[in-house]
Amino acid sequence: MAGASEPDETLMARYASGDMAAFDALYGRHELKLWRFLQRSVRNRATADELMQDVWFTVAREAARYRPTARFTTWLFTLAHHRMIDAHRAASARPAAVAAGEGLPQQLEQLPDTGNPEPMQELESRDATRAILEAVERLPAEQREAFLMQAEGGLSVQEIAAATGSSFETAKSRLRYARGKLQEWLRESV
Amino acid sequence: MTQIPDNDEDAGEDALTERYRAASAAEDSRPPAALRTAIRAQAWKQLAVPAARASAGASPRVASDRSPAANDSHWRLRAVAGLAVVAVGVAIVMQLRRSDTQAPVAAATSKTTPPAATAVPATAAAPDNAPAVATGQVAQSRAAAASPPAAARVADAKTTPPEASAAAETSNFVQQTARAGAAAASATLPVPVPVLVQFEAGAEQPDAAAASELRGIGAYLRANETAQADIASYFDSGDDSGAAAELARRRATAVQTLLESLGVPASRTELTAPASVGPAADTADAAGPTAARVGVRVSVR
């Protein structure tokens, strides 16, 4: 039985050696975080499910070649980031899908924000719990991704930069803007 | 109010993040059970593959030290490989262009170089420690650059230091290559359109704009040995004194002289007698014989 206190990297090594219980432990540990990250990033549940499956299939397939040079979580979110980009490219070939709001990081900045068209005033009528989730969805895609990587994955700025293929300063800037906007919007909603 | 740390790189554990996490946890949405089932099935399947390999005698499911890690930064390797491919491509293109510019030099040399020139290798005067560029076409071009004064070269080799001789040879080679490149470039010039040469009132020399256009014609004629320039002059018929015809003739001659100064021998230009083209219609042309003009046309024969 895979121990709950074992590091992710150890669980990966055990799974690579044939221990399915280690994979179960690993999956259980990150299932919800990754799924929420994907769902809030792509703002489409079906797409999130598809990406989730794709990411974990990759984890299983590449387990034998995984080496603990960095945190497993960073790698996991890096895979998720790349899958989202791939999905966005595929969606770009289907204009209808893009128009339906399947936009993804980076290029999403150029698309109209279809995630939450309600005015901010409507946030005031909702409770604080809903308010912050809706505020996160209103963030620009890259800032939202950075915030979610930190909030859901617990990634540091350095790890966010590595996962998104950006510089440290860029990741830090995105994170700062995201947090600034969230703070401002939440202040307005009170 | 939520305080956001300003400089903390890992400011994830602040109130804002905690608030988000609490809100997120309060939601009861979860990934579908079928998704977990599918992922587990795939994970099992992946385990089964190496097990089958192991039973067949293949290596076990352990990462080889030589194979790249799945979580390596592949993009760096790809970027370096991409740059290397681009660099090789550029080098090939440059080499091809260099070969193209050297070909005319070799061809010209074969027509003008006496046999004695080939008996004196271009590298003969170069010292052993001279730059090693005398290979293939480069050596041929260097021989071509130095070939006409072959005897002089031998004399130079005796009286000048080897370093100076090598430097002069290299300089010759560079100049010859540059000339060959220029010739190759001009050979592709489009046929110039006929130029109507303009003159200031009373002037016998073309103005600056016309001279500039004539330079284009000169370049074309130099690059195309079969091209011929016809210099046709004409004058307004309103003048009966003959002064206009004479001025037209002088202007045509001036154009011919100008082309000569541009490297076009007179044998390749043909002057035609001034022709009367009728009275001028505008005030400028009606100013008397000074209004006569000279036209230049270039035709390839």
Image (cartoon, rainbow, N blue to C red):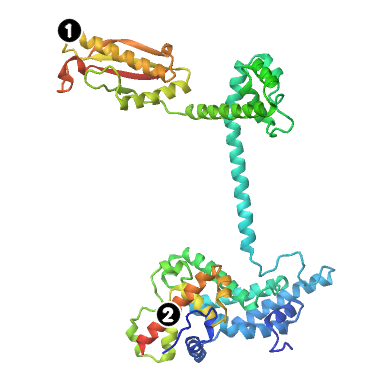
**Residue underneath mark 1:** B241
Give amino acid for label 1.
Answer: Ser
Q: Is residue B262 left or right of residue B174?
A: left
Residue B41 screen position, x and y as percent: 67, 79
Residue at (51% x, 65% y) in the render: A90
**On screen, residue B255 above or below B186:** above
The answer to whether residue A167 is left or right of residue A109 is right
Q: Residue at x 41, y 66 (%)?
A: A110
Chain bearing tag 2 is A
Pointer 1 and pointer 2 on the same chain: no
Q: Nearer the viewer, residue B155 or B180?
A: B155
Asked which quadrant contains residue B35, the reply is bottom right
User: How dense is the environment of label 2, judged by Cα within 10 Å: few (below 14), some, or many (20 and up)?
Assistant: some
Q: Position of residue A50 (x, y in %)?
A: 56, 75
**Residue B121 picture quarter:** top right
The residue that mark 2 highlights is A180
Q: From what the image shows, is residue B7 above or below residue B198?
A: below
Question: Can you say which quadrant of the picture contains the N terminus of chain A?
Answer: bottom right
Image quarter of the C terminus of chain A: bottom left
In this orientation, which residue lies closer to the viewer: B82 or A60?
Answer: B82
Left or right relative to B113: residue A174? left
> Is residue B137 something one can see in this rendering?
no
Q: Amino acid at mark 2?
A: Gly
